Amino acid sequence: MKHRYIPMTGQDEAEMLAVIGADTIEALFADIPAAIRYEGVLPMSGPLDEPALLRHMRLLAGRNANFDEYVSFLGAGIYDHHIPVVINHVISRSEFYTAYTPYQPEISQGELQAIFEFQSYICELTGMKVANASMYDGATALAEAAALAGGYTKRSRIVVSSAIHPEAKEIVRTSARGLNLDIVEVAANNGLTDLEALESALTDDTAAVLIQSPNFFGAIEDARAIEPVIHGRGGLLVMSVNPLSLALLEAPGELGADIVVGDAQPLGIPASLGGPTCGFFAVTDALMRRIPGRIVGQTVDKEGRRGFVLTLQAREQHIRREKATSNICSNQALLALCASVYMSTLGKTGMQEAALLNVRKAHYAADKIASLRDPHTAAPVFELPFQAPFFNEFVVKLPQALDAAKLNAKLLRKGFIGGYDLALADPSLSGHMLIAVTERRTKDEIDRFVHELEECCR
C-alpha cells in the first residue's frame, strides 16, 4: 500500500472496478467533458512527514486572529464571553463527549438528566412552560418557530422585523419557501421595530410576528407594546433573545411571548470561529405538542425512583415525515451541556452580575466613543445614531472619511478585532459599525480601543 493509513490495497481497487465494470479509475470520469476537466497539478506541496505537516498546520492556524492574542469588540451573533474552566472538564468526560441520542433510557440516565436540566434552566430564564432538548442554533430555531406558528394557526403570513439578525432572516425565508409561508418584512426606526409599520403589515392571515430583543443593532425592543397588536389579530408573538440578557431583563413569558428562541452561545460555548453553537426553543403549554426537536421528561420507575425519558415523541424520524412537527432530527446535547454547566456554575446571582458587567462596560465604551471631539471644531467625531436602550452592543456612525473595512484593518494591526461593518448587512448603513462589549473587556482595553479609534481618525 502507498498510504498505510488508507486501508485500500491494489487488489481491493481491482475488485471494486471489476464489480462496477470499469477498467481503470480514470474510466469513472469518462462522462465529464474534457473541456471542463482540470488539467494540470493542483497548487499543493508534496507529501510532508508528520513533524513538517504539524509545523505547516500551526502556521496556518496562526493566521487566525483569536481571542487569546487579540482584544475583540466584534459581536453580531457570536461573542467573547468568559468560559469557566470547569465546563471543558465536564464536557470532556467520555460519557458526554461521545454520547448520541439517548433512545435507551435505561443506559442513558446521565445524558437525559443533563438535557432535562438544560430544559429547566431555559424555562427559568425565558418564563415559558416547556423547552426542548436544544436546536442546531438560534437562527434555525427562529425558522422552526415560524413553521410552528404557520401550522398551529393555519395561516400563511409571517411578519418579520428588519431588526432581526440578517442571517436569521435569510434562514427563515429559505424555510418558509418550502412551507408556502409568505414572509413580510417591516422596517426599523431608530434601531427598533417600527410599531406603526408593524400594525399596517398585520392581516387576518398573519400567523406570527417575529422580533429579536436585544435586536441585531443591540437595541431592546418594546415587546410589551407589540404583544397586544399581534394577539389582537389572533397571531403568535415569537421572540428571539440573548439568554444572558434575561438575567436582567424581564422574561419574555411575562411579556406575553408565545414562542421564545435564541442561541446559547453566550452561556459558556466557545466562539470557535463561528460555531457550532446551540439553539433553544421554549413555548407555552398550548404549543407543547407542536414543539420541534426532543423533550426529556421526568418520571419514576416501578420502584418509585426518579428517572428521565424522551417524551412526546411523535416527531421527526419517529413517524412519517409529512406528519412530523419538524424534520430536524438531531440536537446539540454536548453544547447544551456547556450551557447547563455555565448556569450551574454562575448561579442566579453570578449570571446577574455577568449581565450587569456587560451593560455597564458597553455603556462606558459608548459614552467614551461619543465623547471624542474634533480638536479644531469641537464637534463629535463619532455619533451614536440610535437612542434606544441597549444591552452589550451598540451602533456607531463613523466620520464620513473613514471606511469601516479600512478602520478594522488598522485596528487589527494594533491588536484589536473591531466591530461589525453594517454595510455588509445593509448598504444603506455604510459607514456604521456594530460594537460589542462583554464582561471580558477591561477598562484598560476599552480605553486603549477608544484611543486607537481616535488615532485612526487623524
Image (cartoon, helix red, strand yellow):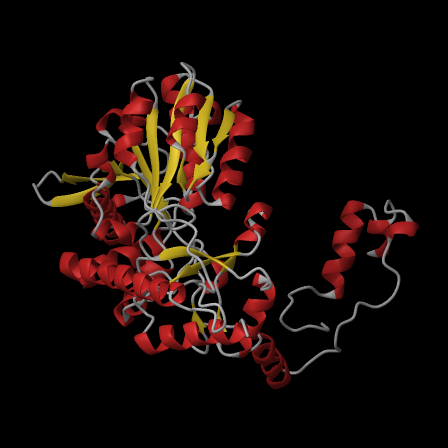
User: Looking at this view, is 402 or 349 the one in front?
Assistant: 402
Question: Which residue shows up at 58% across the image and 71% down it?
Answer: 409
Relative side of 127 to 171, left or right: left
In the displayed structure, 441 sits above or below 358; it is below
Which x, y percent locates residue 211?
Answer: 38, 37
Which x, y percent locates residue 81?
Answer: 34, 64
| Quadrant of residue 38 within the rendered picture | bottom right
| Quadrant of residue 67 within the rendered picture | bottom left
Quadrant assignment for the C terminus: bottom right
Which x, y percent locates residue 154?
Answer: 41, 16
User: Looking at this view, is 100 or 430 the one in front?
Assistant: 430
Residue 258 in view of the camera:
no
Relative side of 135 to 354, left or right: right
User: Looking at this view, is 411 or 119 the one in front?
Assistant: 411
Question: Which residue shows up at 31% across the image and 74% down it?
Answer: 442
Residue 227 in view of the camera:
yes
Question: Which residue shows up at 29% across the image and 70% down it?
Answer: 89
Question: Which residue shows up at 51% across the image and 44% down it?
Answer: 166
